[in-house]
Each structure stands twice: as C-alpha cells, then as structure tokens.
C-alpha cells in the first residue's frame, strides 16, 4: 500500500510540473517505447492533456495467446503501457505481424510500421554461416529480469539455470551432432558470463558461452534459436530462422503459431531439427509466409 501511495504521489507531482513546463514549449510529436511507471506515465498524460501528438511504439515481446488462458492474462497485463494503452489519445504503432495479431485480438486500433531497428541492418555483410565442423549450432538466449521480476512471463535466474540443465541433459547424448551457444543479458549480482562459466564448467562438451559481439551475427550463424519469451524470438523469425520456446513455467510465447504459421520449405525439413523437437518436447515455430504492408508516414 505504501509503495502504491508513493507511485501515485510521484505521478501527481511529476505531472503537475510537466503541465507547467510544456505550456511554454513547442512539442509537435512524441514517441514512447513505454508509458509504464510514474515518470513516463505522467509524461505521456501531460502531453495528451495539452493536446500534443503522442505515439506508443510497440515492444516485440507480446503475442496472441489462447483464449482465457494464464498466457493471455500475462501477455495482456505485461503489454499494458508497452504495446497498448487505455488512453485513447495515444496512437499505437505496431512493429510486427505478431503484435498486429495481438492488438487485433483486443480490438485496439493501431498503425503498422516497419521495425525501427531491423536485425538485417546489424549483422556484418561479410558474415557467413561458419561450417568449421558439421555440428548443428543451437543459439540459446536467456532474458532474466532483476530479482525475478515479471515472473511466469519471463524466467528468473534460477529457472534459467534449470532450463540450461534440462536442455543439456536432453541433448548431451547427441553432442557429436549439436553444439549450443549461450547468450544472456547480464543482471547485476545474479547472472553474467563469469557466473555462467563457473556454473557450466562441466558442461563445456556441449555448451559454450558466446563471445560474439553482435547478437545478429550470432543468429545468422545459427541453425535455430531457443529462448523463453525474448524479443530475439521475433527477430530470429524475421531473419528466417526457426525458433523454439522453452522454459520452466507453462507459458508458451508463440504457441498460437505452432501449426498455422509453418511454411514447408525444404531447408527446414531437417531430421536433426525434428530430433531437437522430440528431445525437448517442443515444436519449432517457422517464419511466416504472410506479407505485411506498412505505412510509415508517422
């Protein structure tokens, strides 16, 4: 209750200041990537109160879920202020067809735009798939929030470690076929490369900690990607890579697309990918064949 009280007080005082400030300032358009928490919530509402144009650019990590499921509740709660808002004066800008589907399910009006940062802009032009050995390279991505924030929707540090252990135990008998490259965003006092190297020192026969600077170079040089609910899943699909959602909680980030999004391209019909599916008990999600027209005059 005290924390909520502080949030409201911060919002009210910050909004009062911003209303006074922007009355004397020019502001034609503003773009937010989130309107959550007191400061950005107050910022966006002060601008709309002054009839300024405010836009909310979607995150790439909120997806369509099964009706009346825990996944639907989690996705909608986490998307509020990140992908959509109840403030009708704020225009919603959607960056992907997955976000389009999600917003359509909520009957929310939005404008389609191209991704502001397209993955293909960030990997090196001379980067090619490395065939130094015949192994299938699996890229394992973890996204952990501090102190286990956003539970169920995102893994905690301990859940991610256990996911690594499970994947290792399921694939270790096939270490001559597969290799796993692991990447994660550092979380202070919880998880980083040093902690991972120490924890996985006896698993280096299958798993290595990535040293590649560009995440997009890593995606390009991998056969497939495994993650729980990271935006990298969407970015990998955009780069024509099959992805698997794997984690300890029951939430499945892309379950809706397991069947109706599969495209029958020869390069994806691979017995080794089918083997990964069977070992992990999960299905690959493949790049969509749907075309998406955008209007970037925003």
Image (spheres, rainbow, N blue to C red):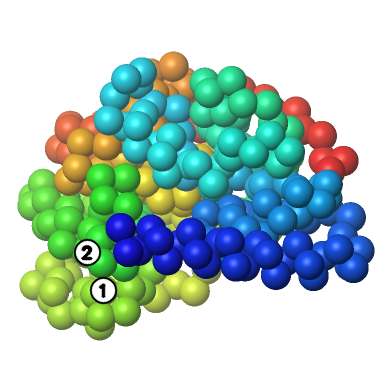
Q: Quadrant of residue 281?
A: top left
Residue 157 has which mark?
2
Asked if residue 123 is positioned above or below residue 265 in the image, the reply reads below
> x and y percent of residue 28 in the render?
89, 55
The C terminus, quarter of image: top right
> x and y percent of residue 84 in the render?
58, 39
> x and y percent of residue 90 in the render?
71, 41
> x and y percent of residue 20 in the render?
78, 67
Element at label 1: loop
Give the residue displayed 83% in from the left and 47% down from the top: 51
**Crowd class of label 2 (few under 14; some 14 to 19; many from 20; radius 10 Å):** some
Side (left or right) of 50 relative to 69? right
The N terminus, quarter of image: bottom left
Side (left or right) of 5 relative to 128? left
* Of the pair 95 and 184, the residue shown nearer to us: 95
Check whether the beta carbons of the residues at disc 1 and disc 2 lie within 8 A of each other: yes
* Of the pair 98 and 37, the residue shown nearer to us: 37
Q: Earlier in the sequence, mark 1 or mark 2?
A: 2
Give the residue displayed 26% in from the left and 67% down from the top: 147
The span from disc 1 to disc 2 (Cα, nearest Å) is 7 Å
Residue 54 visible in the picture: no
**Crowd class of label 1 (few under 14; some 14 to 19; many from 20; radius 10 Å):** some
* Of the pair 131 and 152, the residue shown nearer to us: 152
Give the residue displayed 23% in from the left and 33% down from the top: 282
* Of the pair 26 and 232, the residue shown nearer to us: 26
The residue that label 1 is drawn on is 191
Give the residue displayed 36% in from the left and 18% down from the top: 67
Element at label 2: helix
């Amino acid at each position: 209750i005290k924390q909520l009280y502080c949030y409201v007080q911060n919002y009210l005082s910050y909004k009062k200041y911003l209303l006074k400030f922007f009355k004397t300032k020019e502001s034609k358009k503003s773009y937010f990537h989130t309107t959550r928490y007191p400061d950005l919530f107050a910022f966006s509402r002060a601008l709309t109160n002054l009839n300024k144009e405010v836009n909310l650019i979607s995150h790439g990590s909120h997806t369509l879920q099964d009706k009346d499921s825990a996944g639907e509740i989690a996705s909608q709660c986490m998307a509020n202020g990140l992908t959509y808002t109840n403030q009708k004066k704020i225009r919603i800008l959607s960056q992907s067809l997955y976000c389009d589907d999600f917003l359509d399910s909520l009957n929310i009006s939005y404008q389609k735009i191209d991704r502001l940062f397209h993955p293909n802009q960030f990997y090196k032009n001379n980067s090619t798939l490395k065939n130094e050995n015949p192994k299938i390279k699996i890229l394992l991505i973890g996204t952990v929030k501090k102190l286990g924030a956003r539970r169920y929707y995102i893994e905690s540090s301990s859940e991610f470690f256990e996911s690594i252990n499970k994947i290792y135990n399921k694939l270790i008998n096939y270490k001559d076929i597969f290799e796993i490259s692991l990447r994660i965003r550092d979380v202070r006092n919880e998880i980083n490369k040093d902690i991972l190297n120490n924890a996985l020192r006896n698993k280096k026969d299958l798993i290595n900690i990535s040293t590649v600077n560009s995440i997009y170079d890593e995606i390009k040089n991998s056969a497939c990607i495994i993650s729980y609910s990271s935006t990298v899943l969407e970015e990998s699909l955009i780069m024509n890579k099959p992805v698997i959602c794997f984690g300890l909680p029951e939430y499945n980030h892309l379950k809706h697309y397991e069947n109706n999004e599969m495209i029958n391209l020869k390069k994806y019909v691979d017995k080794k990918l089918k083997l990964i599916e069977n070992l992990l008990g999960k299905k690959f999600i493949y790049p969509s064949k749907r075309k998406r027209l955008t209007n970037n005059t925003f």
